[in-house]
Image: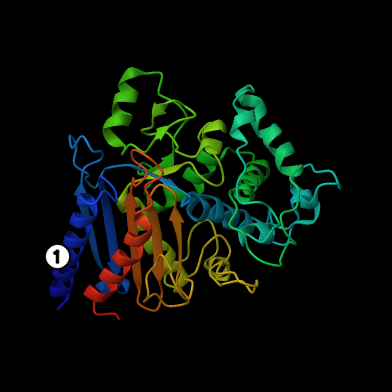
């Protein structure tokens, strides 16, 4: 029976991914599914197409993708959980308890929790990189904090949710201030290494490598993303997001890169911790479970650092349980975990190659998730 389900997923996904490649949704992609409790858990990883439209290199399990906003739950949110266990932060703490702000900033009274559930009053996005790249690298984070502190309030905090890169940029600064470490090192030591995936999920430095051999390896291992009009070059192995690029490739909202098996492994660990089958080494499963509950904010689907399915039009498709959690990445990535079905689904692609104007992924994401759930007979 389980072999039949596996074969059904493989054949059904081969059909929809082949069509997606031929229709230009992306040049190639990779997907992973894990289902069942640990003793009977099955895993599937499949790859499709090529890393770019030259069709010189096929996507394989070692292909590294720009995870984009999967950075928010997998790096920044889990980092907050680590600091919570260590007693160095509380989600009720105010931004002004941690970072230097003047009382004239509306952020003075905003809490960590407000930011995690995207209800802080911050705008969704601002092109800070236009100013930051003019400055020496060592000054940019300090100036970024000033820019964030000077932001006008977009809406009354707590009245609704507006998905905000700015909030997670702020959280990234807070993690570094409290921990005394830069995000890549903190993420590696506290999160990736304990899971045994530190070589497969990581931050990448901004800009081309100075060493020619390293640059060649980067181009060989990574799926390219877009042609960046601001940087005036095709991007491969450096973060697509301009604000993260201006911060050296390291930020709380973007900058993480990874392979399909690394993201699946994180999803499986999160599922087992959520279900009480595993106690993580550096944060508490009980705290994680609190973070995975949808918050009571008008018109919002957000938990803390993770999203939940909307009742209609969810990228997770039409079958996900309301208690499911997940997140999307701008470059064409996603992760969804359904605890009622003991199910983890991961999609990694470079749909922004060669242009971010390609939005066909919006129709493909729910199709992928629905196809998996139907193939498993879990409708």
Residue at image location 35% in from the left, 74% down from the top: 342
Q: Decide which of 34, 236 is in the foreground and name it.
A: 236
Q: Badge 1: few (under 14), some or many (20 or more) residues near its Cα, within 10 Å?
A: few
Which quadrant of the view contains residue 148? top right
Which quadrant of the view contains residue 356? top left
For residue 266, above or below residue 60: below
Q: Quadrant of the C terminus?
A: bottom left
For residue 98, above or below residue 377: above
Is 112 on the left or on the right of 46, as rendered?
right
Is 179 on the left or on the right of 340, as rendered?
right
For residue 317, above or below residue 259: below
Q: Decide which of 299, 62 is in the foreground and name it.
A: 299
Is 240 on the left or on the right of 99, as rendered?
left
* Res. 107 in view: yes
Image position, residue 20 (x, y; %): 24, 55
Give the residue pinned by disc 1.
Answer: 11
Image position, residue 14 (x, y; %): 17, 60
Residue at image location 22% in from the left, 50% down from the top: 21
| Colour pattern of the rendering | rainbow
Q: Decide which of 352, 99 is in the foreground and name it.
A: 352
Is 252 on the left or on the right of 37, as rendered?
right
Which secondary structure lies at badge 1? helix
Residue at image location 56% in from the left, 66% down from the top: 302
For residue 207, above or below residue 118: above
Image position, residue 6 (x, y; %): 17, 69
Q: Quadrant of the N terminus?
A: bottom left
Image position, residue 39 (x, y; %): 27, 73
* Res. 278 in view: no
């Amino acid at each position: 029976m389980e072999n039949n389900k596996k074969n059904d997923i493989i054949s059904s996904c081969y059909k929809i991914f082949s069509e997606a490649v031929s229709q230009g949704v992306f040049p190639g992609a990779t997907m992973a599914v894990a289902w069942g409790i640990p003793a009977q858990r099955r895993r599937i990883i499949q790859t499709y197409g090529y890393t770019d439209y030259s069709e010189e290199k096929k996507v394989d399990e070692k292909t590294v993708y720009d995870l984009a906003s999967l950075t928010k739950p997998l790096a920044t949110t889990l980092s907050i959980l680590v600091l919570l266990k260590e007693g160095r932060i509380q989600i009720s703490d105010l931004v002004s308890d941690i970072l230097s702000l003047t009382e004239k900033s509306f952020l003075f009274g905003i809490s960590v929790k407000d930011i995690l559930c995207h209800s802080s009053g911050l705008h969704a996005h601002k092109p800070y990189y236009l100013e930051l790249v003019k400055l020496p690298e060592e000054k940019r984070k300090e100036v970024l904090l000033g820019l964030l502190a000077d932001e006008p309030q977009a809406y009354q905090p707590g009245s609704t949710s507006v998905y905000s890169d700015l909030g997670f940029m702020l959280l990234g600064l807070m993690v570094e201030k409290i921990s005394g470490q830069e995000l890549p090192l903190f993420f590696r030591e506290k999160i990736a290494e304990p899971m045994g995936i530190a070589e497969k999920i990581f931050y990448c430095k901004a800009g081309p490598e100075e060493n020619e051999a390293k640059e060649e390896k980067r181009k060989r291992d990574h799926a390219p993303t877009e042609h960046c009009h601001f940087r005036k070059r095709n991007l491969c192995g450096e973060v697509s997001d301009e604000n993260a690029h201006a911060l050296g490739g390291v930020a709380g909202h973007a900058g993480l890169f990874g392979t399909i098996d690394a993201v699946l492994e994180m999803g499986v660990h999160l599922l087992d911790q959520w279900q009480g089958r595993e106690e993580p080494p550096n944060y508490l499963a009980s705290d994680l479970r609190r973070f995975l509950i949808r918050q009571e904010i008008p018109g919002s689907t957000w938990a803390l650092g993770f999203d939940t399915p909307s009742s209609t039009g969810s990228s997770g498709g039409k079958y996900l349980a309301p208690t499911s959690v997940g997140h999307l990445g701008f470059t064409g990535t996603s992760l969804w975990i359904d605890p009622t079905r003991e199910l983890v689904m991961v999609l990694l692609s470079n749909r922004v190659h060669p242009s971010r104007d390609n939005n066909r992924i919006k129709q493909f994401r729910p199709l992928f998730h629905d196809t998996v759930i139907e193939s498993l007979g879990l409708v």
